[in-house]
């Protein structure tokens, strides 16, 4: 029996569409058609309408993507953190009676900065717990058959990469412990006038442990992951995916390739927490494959002026993961010793072939009634050259990033003075790559 139009219209008025949800008429702006897209323009919010078995996975994907975005914002906060202690005023001896007021003002300034670090501490604990729970979902027997999708694997790797970069930034920022020591000192002074400061002191101690412990985020992730057994399988799946993607160039863009290179050594350490796990991993991935990857990419960009070295990560984490310390072949990887291959030869070769293809295309346009087969060949060749050009641009961009990372990993030790100056300037290790690693010409 047909529903009257008036009733149908009245029923539509009861439907509620939340913000950023799909429209009733379908996508109205654009449709994503990328073959390998790992991001959804509507965040998979329409999956529940089809009543498929993907609801649980898409809910987890949305959660991981939100955490990735939040983690990038946390990374920006940590990367742009600058010490404010040196900018704080110091009272002369004649104003020592105002010392208490100065302590209070200093505490209020530093407390704002420390609140950002506390937020990062809370976020990483939540993110590690949710990532570990997502991995443990695939350790259930019924989920081992199909396993996570490619999109799900990438989301896990991207979130792990965010955690690795946060940990690396926390370790590299010397200004953070300096500011914290001043903050704790001023807190001791101003808290004498307060009551019930036990919870504040406990929070302060937790923050001190977090900031002073190297690789605290990864250690916390390890604890969260192994609260439940059988996460070794999903770790091995991630390692195999990363190794094959690097060996077969599945990662088309350089940011994705750098993500795989940054997380691979961490995954290897986490997956070899016992001798049994090590044997199981090296049956699926031969150790020589890992060694070749780490040798070919000895320095990995993390930020414009910060880099990661797989060899350094493996050696440093071996102190915290005693079972991994037996992997002597991985721990004896050589230090970075050479620059990436030059770009000039590839550029000259591509320019010649691109000009040749352009000439062929111009000749085709000027020829009347050209042969169909020859026309297809010329157009197909032009298409292939254009695609290759975009791939080369991405590869060259990656090499520039890697070259900058290499320079920061090996700063010039003895700067040579310029001819216009008699005495050599004094450069810090941070300044040497900019001031001394470049030729005068």
Image (cartoon, rainbow, N blue to C red):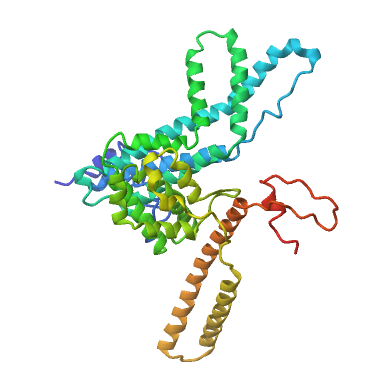
In the image, farthest residue toward the left: 1
Q: Is residue 124 above or below residue 402?
A: above
| Left or right: 426, with 59 as reference point | right
Above or below — where is 338 with respect to 314?
Answer: below
Q: Quadrant of residue 269?
A: top left
Q: Which residue is pictured at 56% across the width and 63% down the height?
A: 340
Residue 429 horizontal/vertical position (percent):
67, 46
Task: Give residue 339's position: percent from left, percent from top.
Answer: 58, 61
Residue 395 place in picture, x, y as percent: 52, 63
Give the quarter of the figure containing the C terminus: bottom right
Question: What residue is shown at x 42% (from left), y 46% (from top)?
Answer: 266
Question: Where is residue 320, by image quadrant?
Answer: top left
Q: Position of residue 243 (x, y in %)?
A: 38, 57
Residue 36 in view of the camera: no
Q: Which residue is painted at 52% across and 26% down in the image?
A: 208
Q: Nearer the viewer, residue 29 or 380?
A: 380
Q: Is residue 390 above or below residue 356?
A: above
Camera sees residue 366? yes
Q: Nearer the viewer, residue 440 or 273?
A: 273
Foreground residue among 65 and 322: 322
Task: State the residue in front, 8 or 177.
Answer: 177
Compared to 362, does 320 lie above or below? above
- Please indicate whether residue 348 sits to the left or right of residue 314 in the image: right
Tell how many labels.
0
Lateral position of residue 70 relative to residue 243, left or right: right
Residue shown at 45%/42% (left/top)?
317
């Amino acid at each position: 029996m047909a529903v009257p139009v008036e009733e149908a219209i009245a029923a539509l008025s009861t439907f509620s569409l939340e913000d950023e949800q799909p429209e009733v008429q379908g996508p109205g702006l654009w449709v994503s058609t990328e073959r390998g897209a790992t991001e959804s323009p509507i965040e998979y919010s329409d999956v529940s309408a089809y009543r498929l078995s993907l609801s649980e996975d898409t809910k987890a994907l949305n959660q991981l993507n939100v955490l990735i975005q939040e983690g990038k914002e946390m990374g920006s906060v940590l990367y742009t953190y600058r010490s404010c202690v040196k900018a704080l005023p110091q009272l002369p001896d004649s104003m020592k009676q105002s010392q208490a007021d100065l302590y209070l003002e200093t505490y209020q300034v530093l407390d704002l900065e420390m609140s950002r670090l506390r937020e990062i501490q809370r976020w990483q604990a939540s993110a590690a717990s949710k990532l570990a729970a997502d991995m443990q979902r695939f350790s259930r027997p019924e989920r081992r058959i199909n396993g996570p999708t490619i999109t799900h694997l990438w989301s896990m790797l991207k979130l792990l990469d965010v955690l690795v970069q946060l940990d690396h930034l926390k370790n590299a920022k010397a200004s953070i412990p300096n500011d914290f020591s001043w903050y704790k000192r001023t807190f001791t002074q101003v808290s004498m006038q307060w009551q019930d400061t036990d919870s504040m002191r406990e929070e302060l101690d937790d923050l001190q442990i977090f900031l002073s412990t190297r690789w605290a985020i990864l250690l916390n992730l390890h604890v969260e992951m192994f609260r439940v057994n059988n996460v070794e399988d999903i770790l091995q799946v991630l390692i195999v995916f990363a190794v094959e993607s690097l060996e077969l160039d599945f990662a088309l863009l350089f940011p994705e390739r750098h993500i795989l290179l940054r997380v691979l050594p961490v995954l290897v350490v986490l997956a070899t927490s016992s001798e049994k796990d090590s044997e199981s991993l090296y049956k699926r991935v031969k150790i020589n494959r890992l060694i070749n990857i780490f040798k070919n990419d000895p320095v990995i960009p993390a930020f414009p002026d910060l880099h990661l070295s797989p060899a350094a990560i493996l050696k440093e984490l071996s102190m915290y993961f005693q079972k991994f310390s037996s992997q002597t072949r991985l721990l004896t990887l050589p230090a970075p010793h050479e620059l990436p291959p030059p770009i000039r030869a590839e550029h000259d070769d591509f320019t010649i072939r691109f000009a040749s293809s352009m000439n062929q295309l111009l000749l085709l346009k000027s020829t009347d009634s050209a042969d169909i087969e020859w026309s297809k060949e010329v157009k197909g060749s032009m298409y292939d050259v254009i695609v290759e050009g975009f791939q080369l641009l991405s590869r060259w961009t990656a090499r520039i990033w890697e070259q900058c990372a290499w320079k920061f990993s090996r700063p010039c030790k003895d700067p040579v003075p310029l001819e216009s100056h008699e005495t050599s300037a004094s450069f810090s290790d941070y300044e040497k790559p900019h001031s001394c690693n470049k030729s005068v010409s």
